[in-house]
Amino acid sequence: MFSFPPAVDKPLPAHRPRAIMVDLIATSKKQVAAGVAFRSIQEIVGAITPVVLGIALDSGMEHGATSAVWIVAGWLAILALVQAVTMAFGHGFEIVLWMRTSLRSITQVHNHVTRSGPAILRKKSTGEVVATAMSDAEHVGNLVEFIPRLIGGLFAFLTVAIVLLNQNVTLGLVVLIGVPIITAAASLLIKPLQSRQQVQRDEQGKLTALGTDTVAGLRVLRGIGGETQFAARYSEQSQKVREAGNAVARLQSWIDGLQILIPGIFTAFVMWQGALLAMDGELTIGDFTALFGLTIYLVRPLQIVMMVVTQFGRARVGARKMFNIFRIQPISGTLEERLAAEKDAERSVENSTSATAETSGASQPARASQTVAPGTVSPSDDVHFASATAMPGHNPFKGPIVDTTTGITIRPGVATAIVTTNPSDAAELAERLARIDDEVSDVTVSGIDIRTMPLALVRKRVLLARATPELFGGQLRSVIDARTPYETIDRPLAASRAAVFGPAAAESPANESRDPDIMSSLEASDAHDVLSSLDNSLSGEITEKARSLSGGQRQRVALSRAILDDPEVLILVEPTSAVDSHTEDRIAKRLMERRSGKTTVLTSGSPLLLNRVDEVVLLENGEEIVRGSHDELLQKSAAGDPLAQRYEWVITRQTGEES
């Protein structure tokens, strides 16, 4: 009954914050209904118990310890048992609701961030995104957890009101009118509490972002002696968080105090009225005892209302933060397109796994991509291209790629190097060719606007490796072969399993089917030292963001990853900027051998690379200046060609050599 429900991978609505909370409740309606049912029974039984106790008291005082008293005592025992069971099951469903909604919120924030890509970091800091996923999502889950309790409290209130109306109309009206007034008064605290929580949340996000950025740039900070300055900035921001937290705590302390004071005053007033009625003879001793139990029990729904007021404020702030994440759209393609691509990839993995199991019976890694003949596309890709090219089976990426912004044409099947006096111009060209941002990617492939092609297809055919690559932690094998799903091994958990169940249960054997290809790509990128630092094992662990590697090692591991992926169009931005000249020459030779006959674009000013590529393009002021092989341009420069001389001046200035 309490098994964790399957995750709901439906994107949360992004048109308003309240819709997020409504959708989270709607997708868990079965769990909400079960929780409400158990909590309602518990609260109704709890409200009836004082009435039964009053009946037993009156019966005992009037007739003594007769069988009727024992019967009523039996009913009290049954009610206590029912209340205990329903409380346990109700709380269980509340925990399931909290876990379900919190996990879904965290998952959807994570999914949206990965689907939106660089668009997120243009508007939100890393710390803000992390705080939204880990803190705000939990607050929304807490609110959903309180729904069964709130509705159960409402039933308890109605039960108490009905019983009191039957006993005395005046007392019943006091409860029916007083409790809604108290609830309305409590709701007035929502807005100021929410405003203060919003300020605290914003300041906490800034502090988290500051800490995250510092961890990422810790080496640089130490290198320039910036620890003291950072510590001062972090301390200043911490004080802002503390002040905002104190502001929330002051109001929260009033709310917590009112949770006790208001129900206490209300209880005292009702009991005072009941005492007057008892002295007038309108209430029996049993009725008065029942009244006391009912009013004491009435404190519970009032406290639940106050707790919901607090949680609603936090949840609304959290939902607004999530909403601000969800409203960010990708800068290339659409969310719908990315969702469809994910489903296609999942189906491809399932089909590949099934086919492997049927043919060999061996466990092999599922590959999302399929092998196709050169110059063609896979069947699923052909469907997308048919409408765009009217030539089913034709692969536009076998044709020329033209950047209309600069007029540069990348010829198919050759290695082209882009040389420029401004490295940012070359980096921007690389991002346009890879369709990173649709707003600026005015690029055609075989005459077709690249923005009209399915984004998943572009990502499959074109790979961009930036100058400062991002690497994930994990086994070196999985870091390089990023497209293959490898099992993530939790080392502490594996050690615990080995201690309890023996070494055989520690972990499953590593998947080594792709190791020869991985080793070949490591050799091409001259990254043998990375392997040797990990005991010559591809199972060696790389720390988070590959901080255990030097800058040159990270660059070569990233290059190895790009080589292994073997895309039709490979775009490399300054791929050897962090290595020495001997290593660079070996990489250039092996890279060109691996990419022979495939479209490769490099941005670099290194003669060692330029001498290996098929042609070089000099880019200045946003336009192509001259084109040719490195040797041809140097010969033309010696012959007095001014454009070729400009090229020679650029590369000699970048390398520090004299012309």
Image: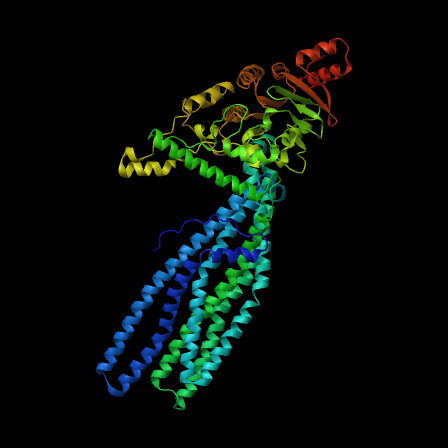
Figure colour scheme: rainbow
- The quadrant in which residue 615 appears is top right
User: On the rendered image, what quadrant is the N terminus found in?
Assistant: bottom left
The residue at the point 30 percent across, 35 percent down is: 505
Above or below, 228 relative to 195: above
The residue at the point 57 percent across, 44 percent down is: 335
> Can you give x and y, in whole percent of width and height, for residue 262 in the image?
49, 72
User: On the rendered image, what quadrant is the C terminus found in?
Assistant: top right
Above or below, 193 relative to 333: below
Between residue 317 and residue 204, name the one nearer to us: 317
Q: Is residue 369 left or right of residue 230?
A: left
Between residue 183 and residue 599, name the one nearer to us: 599
Count of numbered marks: 0
Residue 522 visible: yes
Above or below, 572 relative to 324: above
> Can you give x and y, in whole percent of width and height, for residue 196 in the image?
59, 58
Above or below, 639 relative to 222: above
Between residue 530 and residue 87, name the one nearer to us: 87
- The quadrant in which residue 272 appears is bottom left
> Can you give x and y, in whole percent of width and height, for residue 187 in the image?
55, 67
Between residue 367 and residue 121, name the one nearer to us: 367
> Can you give x and y, in whole percent of width and height, for residue 182 in the image?
52, 73
- The quadrant in which residue 567 appears is top right
